[in-house]
Image (cartoon, rainbow, N blue to C red):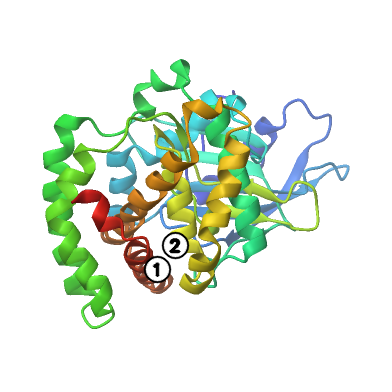
Amino acid sequence: MSAISVFKLEDISIEWLNSMFADSSDQVVGFRCNSVGTGQMGANIRVELEWKSKSVPSTVIMKFASNDKKTRATGIQTGAYEKEIRFYSEVSHLVDVALPKIYRAEIIPGTADMVLVMEDLAPMEQGDQLVGSTFEQAQVAVREAARLHGSTWDSDSLSSKDWLTKRKSSDIGDFVALVHQLFFSFFSRYKGDVSKSAIDVGNNFLPLIHKWLRTAPDPICLTHGDFRLDNLMFDMEVERALVVVDWQTVSFGVGISDISYFLGSGLLPALRSQYEKILVQEYYDVLKSYLEPRIYTFSECWYGYRRQSFGGYLMAIVAAMLVERTQRGDQMFLAMLERHADQVVQLDAFSLLS
């Protein structure tokens, strides 16, 4: 890797760009930058490259840490920036999932000084969390998640990586205290924008969060952690119909959590209730091609799907209060909260915590 490091949009230079393509016989002689996407934790930039002899790639996507101080602090504290860089650098080659080509992945550990330069996936289109997923998009997504989980199931090499492990049991008390604080802040901020049913789910869940966390199943595979429409790139007309991006919340965890989160937040409630068991079965059918059926039954899968519906509800609240507030962010987090509240009620998930 070149000694040149760039961690801010304004520092991009032709010299730095050429250091990325040192193996090319061509040279970058100019570039233009435009913001793209709706990321909460980072800033995504499309860079158009002007080559001396019209080489490829003609464009790349660059990802820097957010400029917002609160969001950057959250990214450092949670390890989000470091996780994404280390995912691409250390473990991406182990997963059976479609990923963008990476040209550079660099970070100064313990800081928000990071840059990710990746393939521009256009004309693939980013999913829209607010609009919601179609049934066909959901089919593709659950299959891709199954490949991620199945290819890393019970992996000793991944479960031993400290940066991939989730919260220790000794940390549960501190996290629960933080969640209580964020709950009250969230409902104070969005007073009048949340339905009574969604508030009731929160009031009933708050006293049970410690139990829900303490009795969580053991981690078993690599999970994306934020497997939702905004982090999925689609082109339903080609064989490679889906590419998964934004690996800032990757961990060694409980695979079905990605499915409960995706279907709960990404499908409109009527569509979800109509097709969710079909889609969970489709996920399971792909997953079991990696496993012996006795290792993980569909009954266990469906139980986990119901139990993890609380995770999406919790994510909507915690994430909303820890990142920069934006108009679209408000709409997205409120939609997620309402959809997951409906999921919890429809699945009678509280009965699993009694």
The image shows residue 66 at horizontal and vertical percentages of: 41, 53
- Residue type at tag 1: Arg
319 relative to 291, above or below: below
Q: Earlier in the sequence, mark 1 or mark 2?
A: 2
* Residue at position x 40%, y 22% in the image: 159
79 relative to 163, above or below: below
Mark 1: few/some/many CA within 10 Å (<14, 14-19, 20+)? many
Residue toward you, 176 or 81 = 176
* Residue at position x 51%, y 51% in the image: 10
Q: Quadrant of residue 336?
A: bottom left
User: Distance between the Cα atoms at labels 1 and 2?
Assistant: 6 Å
Using residue 305 as the reference point, say whether residue 283 is left or right of it. right
SS category of the residue bearing label 1: helix
Tag 1 residue: 339
Mark 2: few/some/many CA within 10 Å (<14, 14-19, 20+)? many
Q: Quadrant of residue 34?
A: bottom right
Residue toward you, 191 or 277 = 277
- Residue type at tag 2: Ser
The image shows residue 60 at horizontal and vertical percentages of: 68, 47
Residue toward you, 82 or 15 = 82
The image shows residue 206 at horizontal and vertical percentages of: 15, 57
* Residue at position x 15%, y 45% in the image: 210
In the rendered image, the quadrant that contains the N terminus is top right
Using residue 49 as the reference point, say whether residue 310 is left or right of it. left
SS category of the residue bearing label 2: helix
The image shows residue 196 at horizontal and vertical percentages of: 23, 79
Using residue 112 as the reference point, say whether residue 179 is left or right of it. left
Q: Residue 46: in sight, yes or no?
A: no
Tag 2 residue: 265
- Residues at circles 1 and 2 in contact by the CB criterion of under 8 Å: yes
Give residue 218's mark.
none
